[in-house]
Amino acid sequence: MDIERGFPSMRSFLRLALFFLLFVITACGCVACMHSRQTSQTTTRCPADLFAIKSEQSAPVRLIILNSECPTPYFAKVDFRVENTSARTISRYQVHMFTSYGGQIENDSSTSVTMMPPLDSKSAGDETGSDSLGVSLKRGWLSDPKALLTLRVTSVDFTDGTVWKSASD
């Protein structure tokens, strides 16, 4: 008699309940997935003593670390600025990042060779160029005080055709 008045049968009710349950499970899964994706994309600042700059007095540029990010325990990225300290215009510079552990250089892990519009001397106004390098880390170096990533300018090309090279090469 209830069926005639428009009430659903038990089978219809169970189908509707199952559909609702699947909908809730799917929605919760999507929310959890989006939350974990947002959390994993959050970058954190690297330990302050992870990066170092090795410079030579004769170098025609100065490196300045602007920012560092360590999105995972096995990857580090550093943003830096190159400032021209010479009286000549620079057309290209090369920066290497060396990884060392316990004072022993392990390898030349990253290289940035930047061709750019001429980097003018200090007196000309525009004296900086910005760049970044990233490196894969091993042994969970982010928490290890023996780990060090060293940035070093290895060569600078001037617009007049002369080249400055690091004495360490």
Image (tube, rainbow, N blue to C red):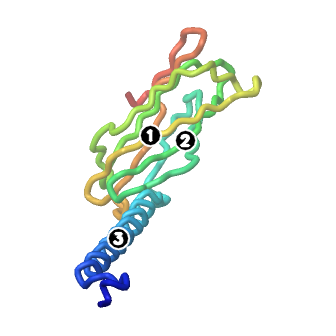
Residue position for label 2: 80
3 and 2 marks in contact (CB < 8 Å): no
Q: Is residue 149 left or right of residue 61?
A: left
Residue toward you, 39 or 23: 23
Q: Is residue 137 left or right of residue 38?
A: left
Q: Secondary structure at mark 2?
A: strand
Residue farthest bottom in this picture:
1
Residue 147 appears at what percent x and percent y?
A: 35, 55
Residue type at the position of mark 2: Phe
Q: How far apart in space, not on screen, are marks 2 and 1 (Cα)? A: 8 Å
Q: Secondary structure at mark 3?
A: helix
Task: Kindly identify the residue that appears in the image at 33 percent across and 68 percent down.
Answer: 26
Residue 86 appears at what percent x and percent y?
A: 65, 25
2 and 1 marks in contact (CB < 8 Å): yes
Residue 160 vertical placement versus 102 (above, below): above
Residue 84 vertical placement versus 11 (above, below): above
